[in-house]
Image (spheres, rainbow, N blue to C red):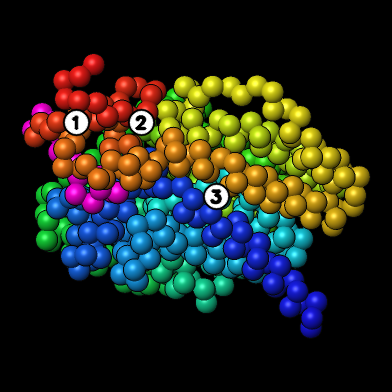
Amino acid sequence: MSQAIGKWAAAALLVYFLFFFGLTSVGLVGPDEPRYASIAREMARSGDWLTPRLWGEPWFEKPPLLYWIAAAGFRLGLGEDWAPRLGVALLSSAFLAFFYFFLKRRFDPDTARYSTLILATSAGWLGYSHACATDLPMSVFLACAMLCALGWIEHGETKCLPWAGACLGLAVLAKGLVPLVLAAPLFFLGIRRLRAGARALPAFLMVALPWYVFSAWRHGRLFIDEFFLRHHLERFATDSLQHVQPFWFFVPVLIGGLFPWSPLLLLLFSSRARGNPRLRLFFWWLIWGFLFFSASTNKLPGYLLPLFPAAAVLLGSGLKESREAQRWLAAGAALLALTPAIAEVLPQALAVGLSRASIPAGTWWTGLPWLALAALAACNRPSRAVWLAALSAVSAIAYLKQTALPAVDRQASARLFWRALAPKRDAICVSSVHRAFRYGLNYYSVIPLPDCRVAPRPWELIQTPGAPPVLRPTGGH
């Protein structure tokens, strides 16, 4: 009993460290996070939980699930940094617990352990678990829907289908119609059982439909044009949203998002992995989603996050079946030697873009401890190697949280900048600022600073590409 309590305590401590420690060390960053948080704060303030509004205007870029989660945090008085992020972190950690126990029951303890470790410590999943963004909630509920439908795909079981339908409905409330496209493998793998699969439909409609019906009835053409035409059809087929990327864009995104476990992707090509009928759904989930997103004209890194649970299961199962699991784990742990370099690049990449970030020099020797842990993992049996790999990943995350996050807060977030500006806000207007920084500034100022062209003031805020914003006298040089 005491041993079991110790394991649960250790697991709880690990979850706290991964997903909650340092959650607000960085202010809201990028254009999306402060924008979504602003909408949620207005929703909590106004009491209108059905129409998302940004600075008083309806904003139909995304459905309301994330706003509801963050608005609940504002209603609870969690503050400007905790309220937008805490619900996402709780959702991620709760899903990982479900993910582990589901895989343990459906597969075996080793597959569950490996898969959960890979997912929980991968760069993409961990990063989005710390952000007020729609990608993580959609990924969680899509994954729950796919897992709940696995018994129907394999054996025709129908008892979990209502849960699958409800989870798919929540995914649609998180990010629109994309989850329906990503769930296509359920339909073509279960084509012979579609009549029984219809048991999922009532729960799906009950969860997903009311908000869409209300929005179409209340806002009519505005909602349909903005939500469906612009942010679904145009996002997929045209360059109007200015996120155009080449077809191969998601190859490095997948490799980087699964860091440090990227070498394990080679396990997907093993005959054992390809020949396992229990993994069919996960293969198609990953492959179909990857091809669909690659075919889209507009591409952003977060689009790929819903595929990460499938990838984690495939990699975890591959590790379980591999005769050299400890060497694969060691390969991932060895990549963590790059952690000090990543800590230097990350703040610049988030502030001015990866292409403008400088390449660090002279940090190679600080990665030696992770190389030592990788060597130990390679020399041990798999049961010990997985814990050494986990120790490597957790120590790397600790290093990043202690060294990189303060720099990210200074360089990529408007939080500290606004605190310095706030005493003379009435004398400042905005001349030219990057949209990512402008949204953050608007969020922390609550009432946005005016545009200098509309309301000139003694001081203007201006920013040149690749440089931080500066405050100067109006018309100054």
**Residue type at mark 3?**
Trp
Q: List the single residue furthest toward the bottom.
A: 1
Residue at the image position 61 percent from the left and 24 percent from the top: 360
The label nearer to you, 2 versus 3, is 3
- Does residue 327 appear to the left or right of 465 in the view shown? right
The circle drawn on residue 125 is 3
Q: Main secondary structure of the magenta part?
A: loop
Q: Which residue is mark 1?
A: 459
| Residue 218 appears in the picture as rendered | yes
Q: Are marks 1 and 3 in contact (CB under 8 Å)?
A: no
**Residue type at mark 2?**
His
Q: Is residue 273 above or below residue 15?
A: above
Mark 2 vs 1, N-terminal side: 2
Q: List the single residue furthest toward the left.
A: 454
* Cα–Cα span, label 1 and label 3: 41 Å
Q: Which residue is mark 2?
A: 243
